[in-house]
Amino acid sequence: MTLTVLFAAGDAAFAEYRAPLTQAFAQHDLKIDLVTEAAPEAVDYIIYSPASTLRDFTPYTRCKAVLNLWAGVEKIVGNPTLTQPLARMVDPALTRGMVEYVCGHVLRYHLGMDAHINATPGAWVQDEPPLAPERVVGILGLGELGRACASALAALGFAVEGWSSRPKSVQDVTCHHGADGFKTLLRRADILVTLLPHTPQTENILNAAAFAQMRTGTRIINPGRGALIEDEALLAALNTGQIAQATLDVFRVEPLPAEHPFWAHPNVTITPHIAATTRAKSASQVIAENITRVEAGAELLHKVDPARGY
């Protein structure tokens, strides 16, 4: 039987994904009619991103699953018309990209590279930074990406501590959970990495009260979600030195408006949402595997829990 798969992620993405998806479907022995338009009642699966104009899922009565191309699902999970199972993107290449970004910026802060790179002629300050085991790196969020980053940093020798809303266990990582655990991690981290999903519970989780509990001079790296941080509170904490530096890859509005004060702040590094991009070749394999599983009667991988929002 030939399955109809609707690619609802925009024309530019379709040009990028068409060949890798076709190849992945062939490797999984799937007979697929990959289309950008179809009668809703004929669609078996939807490959989706928020770049799509598709907002009403009600007519897609035959659809067995919606497969998100992005790791984040906050822009779709609350759609009341979405009654089909939703899978978030968990892609090994995306995970590796995030690990490399996080480790790179943690090492940059750990080694004090900004001061050395920007040193003026005649400046010859030979400081002695602590070694990795003496530096506490905190990870907010111990999902797929958080666990991978925590493990990689622990392998580099850092004292890694993580936090999640529910109890988690990660080898060589001190794990905290709940409200008390959140406060403990804030007090202990020298460098704090935010990898939480965006939900009503996590929005503005790093606010003025949270910054006040951190060690003076903490560095923050946010490749997770822009709404995790209250912008005005972060700017205030940077101005007092409570937070020494911040590297931000995600923002409430993207691209970040030219007039936003983050651009002008000397202690803020901005990157253009590049920490963990979905790569077409590897993501296509994930999608093909998921469709194969569902067709075989197995459980959908990376299924989103609408009640939790991820």
Image: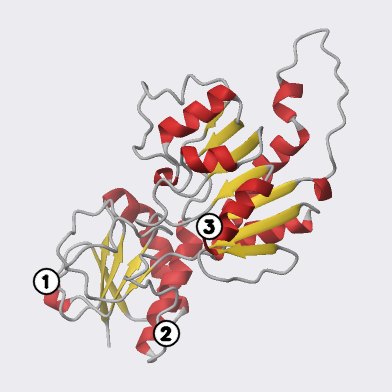
Q: Is there CB contact under 8 Å for labels 2 and 1?
A: no
Rounded to the nearest angstrom, the CA distance separating label 1 from label 3 is: 32 Å
| Residue 231 position in % (x across, y down) | 42, 34
Residue 167 sits in quarter: bottom right
Q: Name above or below for residue 291 compared with residue 268.
A: below
- Near-viewer residue (200 or 69): 200
Q: Which residue of the protein is positioned furthest toward the bottom in this rendering?
A: 297
Mark 1 residue element: loop
User: Which residue is tagged 2?
Assistant: 293
Question: Which residue does the image show at 61% across and 48% down from the upper left?
Answer: 186
Residue 259 at x, y = what percent?
A: 36, 21
Give, as a three-letter code, the residue at label 1: Ala
Crowd rating for badge 1 (residues with CA inside 10 Å; few <14, some 14–19, many 20+)? few
Q: Is residue 270 left or right of residue 12?
A: right
Residue 281: x percent and y percent? 48, 61
- Which residue is label 3 attached to? 94
Image vertical order of residue 118 relative to residue 193, above or below = above
Image quarter hosting the N terminus: bottom left
